[in-house]
Image: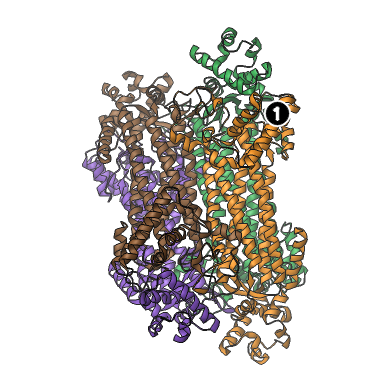
Chain colours: A orange, B brown, C purple, D green
């Protein structure tokens, strides 16, 4: 995919590469080598990059204004043809760059041959992929903001809905469903920050690196960089051609995001089970059985969970491709595109599906609440009360609580249902006040530390996020 | 993708699933859920499996002969339509199974409704993928045998062509290029055995597991198993539905194969460099530059090397998908197909390309030989001679050799160019015979141990493999 | 790690490698290069391999009987010292091979210098790792057989215990817990067969490949192969030195096994939740809270689930290490040991822990049964009855069933609780016999197809496995 | 590893957890569950975190100043004991947290029981790992800056040393070795920026999340956050306990870094080959053979290359661990530590070894230069000259160049060695000036575009980086 290092092709199709090769490429070679089937997705980036390059060539006087205007018009026409579905991509022309250039020659004639001045397919493809990934990052950001908005809405709605707070899928302490959803808002915030970091780091222009060594033409790399929205040109031409960090950064951010989505997806699958019955997805987000009405398969959640596999697999793929590659460009690097394209499509689907599910789901608040009751979920509240009210060291308070729980277990009741006298049999200093702390609503309301599960805390966080997101 | 647990779809398109759903599926749901875009590749397996099922239903009297014949004829017609490119796949029908069944109903009417008796989409899809992967395994075996044949041919041709035997990319001892190529024949032999093991392990029929529990119909699972070339039916219906080991086995074998191919590909890239000049690929397997004639980019080798990334990535993908999945079928498992399909296509390309390169390449025998000369590559021969002829313990022989090499280094010559007198200054017992062992041809010829690099050994191995492969 | 290509070391510690190096190795070099900290785990394999090599050298007359006997006695003494914890491993001697050889020289003097005749560290280390991995395979097989035995025992015990058969974690049809456990017996059977295949494929001896080219000594590779329990010597000396497939085969088998264990582990975690209450682990296999008695954290199950990550990670690691490595030995290949050692330890823990949990768990049979009831889990039984008794095509039977289920839903009862008259309002041909098929026990008992969930089928499979395992 | 959800242990060892368990934990359980063998590496973070928590408890009046002072002194004593190697870690106490607390109780008595007020092992371990990873990030940054410094030094030294600029390991255009080295300075700069982004994102305090719900104690999370150098407390207590993004961020940055190091390592291995002879490593960074003096195995480079496998494997490991985990803490998450610890040690070794190699290596400038000559490496210079001097469109200039190269090939000379008359046979407009552009030094000097290979550009970049790094 390098300008000076071309695969031979039939004369009629690709006359640019001269006749150095006496035999045509083997069929297998065309199949393994051609990238047009997938790299045509970068047509907008390729044309946009060429236009910026052309404007710079005009501005610096490397080509004439007349030639430049013809090139720009021709490129616009090609863009129109592609977007109208009228462009015929040819595999013999191998990739998007040659397909566009060949068409440009048809449209405007020899002036087309001036576009590639001071450029190489090496910096051209590096530019195209980078622009494409940057667009993918921007898209992910918008979609993730929408997912956050959906989570915040539902969190506000369920700011007081008590559910079990789990560790090890065992009830640890009562929390609210709103608080639980807000945890994902935080995770997604980190995902967005990760994509933003990736964007900032990739936002340097490789254009002007030419084949790999830079060029002797008096190009203005700052101009093209600025034109294309980059912060600056890359500082080393070999690196510009050899680097695929931007794709790795994108895939790494996508992989961590995918684990977050898989966690929420797993929870939705579990919550939708008949045994949990915490939430219900509507027909729009579950599939069922014509003969088993209760069966509501959370297919979308399972697919989101499962698709984490392909995202992580794609990251792994590109890391392996890049492992041990000597500089600068090796054809191995053509393997960067398909993983990136696939992940972008996968994120599109998964974020949308998750956003849809979050907006769609109905929490079964009574069922969640009922699930919180057994298991002495407020035992830690009792321990904390002993520390706070009786100044008993925490570890001792823990011991006393254990004994009181054991007593309640023997009596077959919750600790909040013991009498004060019964409690006194374990610890005589306990006062009537203790009962104000026991019970799941009291427990939840008491967790007022910053970031805690108290409904006011949850609402405050939700409010903050609504402001940030608007 | 389960028969009784269906995604809702427009009434007009998919009337089989009744009208339990009041709202249609969200558009995102259709996009994330439908598998027809990729699972249509399994049409032959789906139809073949249905025909075997139908024949069994007829034989056991579960359906009538008349209905059965209609179904079989209808399925054959559909197969013809698909292969003629006349079949219209509908996304609203979600997958290959429903597309085929819906068309069958159009063709033969209500009798089509009897085909799915004692079957579920769960065992149907498990069957289809398994049959597809088995075909992929068989194809890999044929292609790998061809690669071995190519390697053996070239190995025989170059059985005496001396090249450096490398460790750490440093010359260790002289070997022959034929010997080097035969090492890959052994690696590929293990790959084939790995695919064969996978085939044997997967060669059990899931058909008859129905949804997951088996069925009350008096089916004959042995009959369908035999009909479809399986060794036996799977022994547990839950396992039949939940298992994707066969795909993992295929991907694991493919991954190890991919590392082998990547090693040979790396060697070809290095050998093609101007600095090594060990081999030359023809125009058919390299791409060049119209203005730099010596530049012969080994693109195919680089792509084979790089594509190891996606194969290993695919294995990783499916292992992650299956990690932590509760039984039996989860929609996550729909993620098994695309990695398997992609890897099958990738192996196709990579094995073909490698076979083509092996057949195409020309070794630069003088250049290889010249590369072997410097570096005292026969020092170990001298040490071995000292042990064999003078009965000096190996470690001491090593010390003596070190001193002689140092002497040669000082004199600026190879050890074979030292005089006997010069050698005597280090070890007086050395005799004239030593010179028969020094020199790279003598060295290579002396390695007569089984599997060694002596040309006769190489030819014997090549002969053996030719017999095995014919 | 090659015999002829050694890291320099202090004269006093390692006098074997002569004084070619004027400066000592950098400290960082010693840290990155020395493998003794981990490869000492292979001491038994190293000594066993050396003894076999020595016996062959004696038998072929390459060394004298007297020297050979001294070497064998010395090696036995070293083995004893290591196993008694009296051996001092020295990092300056870099690896297990040199540590053993240096000590042998101390014990028996110059004759020790004859052991390495016709051998190199390259084939020695290839042999050691291979023997070690073979032992790991054998150990896995024994442990997995024990896990199967545990599963079979419990399956027999619970052959009639009804539980929901899940797809998508939604009840699909009733099955028995015994049947569910037997599914894992099948998975583990495939795992064992995978390890056996790996064993068979790796069971060829690399010994005699020497540095890489074979040797001029009249060695008998068949003898050492047989002595060490190998089926035959490897057929290509370069391959013998460059191959790490055996480790990859082991890691691939381990990875697939790890996904199986992770699935059962996930189920145990879910089953232990208060919402499911399907099983209970004793104190021995759960951790709890001193103050929350119901909290029984299934830590061991979670660790088994989580440790699938490191096993798959290890497979990935070694595939990446081997990717693109030119032949034959590269120092990169030293990275094979730690992943293999870690995985062996991890499998040890995980299989044992899982076997312990399977033996330890108590199923809450009433809770499982109660969980099966809602959701019209026997709807498919009704559909099958309509086909079998009334000869209604399957798809039509499905429709009728859907309507009857809808009726029951409206009435707020199970389909088995409808009156015949009520059923007749949907389908008049239904007879009283239908009620013999409805109800979860009848459903389960009816699945008599081979591999189905009928208790007799489950018992038959369990009996078969008991015989196989004894 | 949660405070309220403890593994039972022998009374004598761990009296804190009461006696709810009648049977002791199985031996296997202790082996799989205990983390003290590896988590003791976090002792400094654990004690530092406890001290900050204690100071906050004092400041807010939750504990008395007297108790607080005792605790702080006790913790300091324990830190001293551990660093002096006098601390006895007990496996029965399971982890670093309980080991420290148990010892604190021995030293200061019951007051120790107040330290854990308003804290849980859940937020404690989340804090410890986060602090540890932050330290690892800081260490990587320092080491990477040193690697950059080494690269910049050598780049300045070799700013004019001409070498082939490779694509596909084929010479494309001449560049300088300094320029090549500066490309790695840019890559490492991105690595550092990636670690910095990770640091910034992880720099929020989980302390105060308690078990998962927050706490009713009037804690000051801002105070502990500030005390420990965090930017702020985390905003959601569930997220604080469930998050391992910080470890994933670290591992992702490490993986991309590892591919960069593997690329340079691969180049060093290739450059050190006898066929390339571009660089030479001293004895300190290569290993050799006592009898083959030219053999200089670049072991350290190979290990750096190979160790990319384990780093990527570790990222993969933790992504798999986190995939599909329901909130909040699951014991699976204990699997975060070992990959992170291992990667930190691996980076330590690999960055140091690479820095050492860069400082150590000697470029063979004449050999590099000689390698650049063949292959018409300046053909693109001729094409550019045609465009610049004769205003020929780039594509036509390319064609003319191809013909001139063909002519030179026929004549058996370089294009710079053709006469003007010979050139005129292809393109009559060429003038004498053209010869000023041909020749590799002229070529290199002409690439003056920003980031190009012209020595002045390289020196300018090196100067800039020296300033940045000082």
- Percent from the top left, x then y, of residue C33? 48, 42
Quadrant housing residue C118: top left
Q: Residue placed farthest to the bottom in the image?
A: A421
- Percent from the top left, x then y, of residue A408? 60, 87
Residues packed near mark 1 inside 10 Å, few (<14), some (14 to 19) or many (20 plus) = some
- Percent from the top left, x then y, of residue D246? 63, 56
Q: Relative to residue C150, is residue B307 drawn left or right?
A: right
Is residue D99 at least partly visible in the picture?
no
Q: Nearer the viewer, residue D453 or C25?
A: D453
- Percent from the top left, x then y, of residue C95? 42, 45
Residue occupying image coordinates x 60% and y 59%: B28
Q: Relative to residue C102, is residue A338 drawn left or right?
A: right
Which residue is denoted by mark 1 in the rendering?
Answer: A70
Work out which quarter of the rendered image holds the N terminus of chain C and state it: top left
Is D227 situated above or below D5?
Answer: above
Is D203 situated above or below A154?
Answer: above
């Amino acid at each position: 995919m390098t300008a000076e290092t071309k695969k031979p092709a039939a004369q009629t199709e690709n006359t640019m590469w001269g006749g150095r090769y006496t035999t045509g490429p083997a069929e297998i070679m065309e199949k393994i080598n051609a990238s047009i089937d997938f790299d045509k997705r970068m047509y907008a980036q390729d044309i946009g990059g060429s236009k910026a390059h052309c404007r710079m060539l005009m501005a610096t006087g490397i080509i004439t204004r007349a030639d430049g205007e013809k090139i720009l018009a021709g490129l616009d026409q090609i863009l129109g043809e592609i977007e109208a579905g009228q462009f015929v991509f040819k595999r013999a022309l191998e990739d998007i760059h040659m397909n566009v250039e060949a068409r440009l020659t048809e449209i405007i004639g020899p002036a087309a041959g001036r576009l590639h001045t001071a450029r190489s397919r090496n910096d051209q493809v590096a530019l195209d992929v980078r622009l494409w990934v940057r667009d993918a990052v921007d898209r992910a950001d918008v979609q993730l903001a929408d997912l956050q908005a959906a989570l915040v809405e539902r969190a506000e709605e369920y700011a007081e809905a008590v559910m079990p707070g789990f560790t090890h899928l065992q009830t640890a302490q009562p929390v609210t469903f709103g608080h639980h959803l807000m945890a994902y808002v935080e995770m997604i915030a980190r995902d967005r920050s990760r994509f933003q970091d990736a964007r900032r780091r990739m936002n340097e222009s490789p254009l002007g690196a030419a084949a790999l060594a830079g060029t002797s033409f008096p190009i203005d790399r700052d101009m093209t960089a600025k034109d294309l929205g980059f912060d600056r040109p890359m500082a080393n031409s070999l690196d510009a051609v050899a680097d695929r960090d931007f794709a790795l950064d994108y895939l790494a951010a996508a992989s961590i995001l995918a684990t977050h989505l898989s966690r929420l997806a797993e929870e939705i699958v579990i919550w939708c089970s008949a045994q949990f019955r915490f939430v219900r997805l509507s027909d729009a987000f579950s599939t069922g059985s014509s003969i088993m009405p209760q069966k509501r398969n959370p297919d979308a959640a399972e697919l989101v969970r499962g698709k984490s596999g392909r995202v992580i697999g794609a990251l792994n793929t590109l890391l392996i491709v890049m492992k041990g590659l000597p500089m600068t460009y090796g054809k191995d690097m053509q393997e960067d595109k398909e993983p990136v394209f696939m992940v972008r499509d996968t994120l599109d689907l998964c974020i949308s599906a998750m956003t849809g599910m979050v907006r769609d789901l109905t929490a079964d608040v009574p069922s969640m609440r009922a699930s919180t009751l057994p298991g002495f979920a407020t035992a830690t509240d009792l321990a904390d009360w002993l520390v706070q009210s009786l100044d008993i060291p925490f570890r001792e308070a823990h011991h006393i609580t254990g004994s009181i729980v054991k007593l309640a277990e023997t009596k077959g009741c919750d600790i909040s249902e013991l009498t004060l006298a019964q409690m006194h049999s374990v610890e005589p200093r306990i006062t009537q006040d203790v009962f104000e702390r026991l019970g799941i609503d009291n427990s939840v309301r008491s967790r007022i530390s910053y970031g805690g599960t108290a409904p006011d805390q949850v609402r405050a966080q939700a409010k903050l996020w609504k402001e940030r997101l608007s």
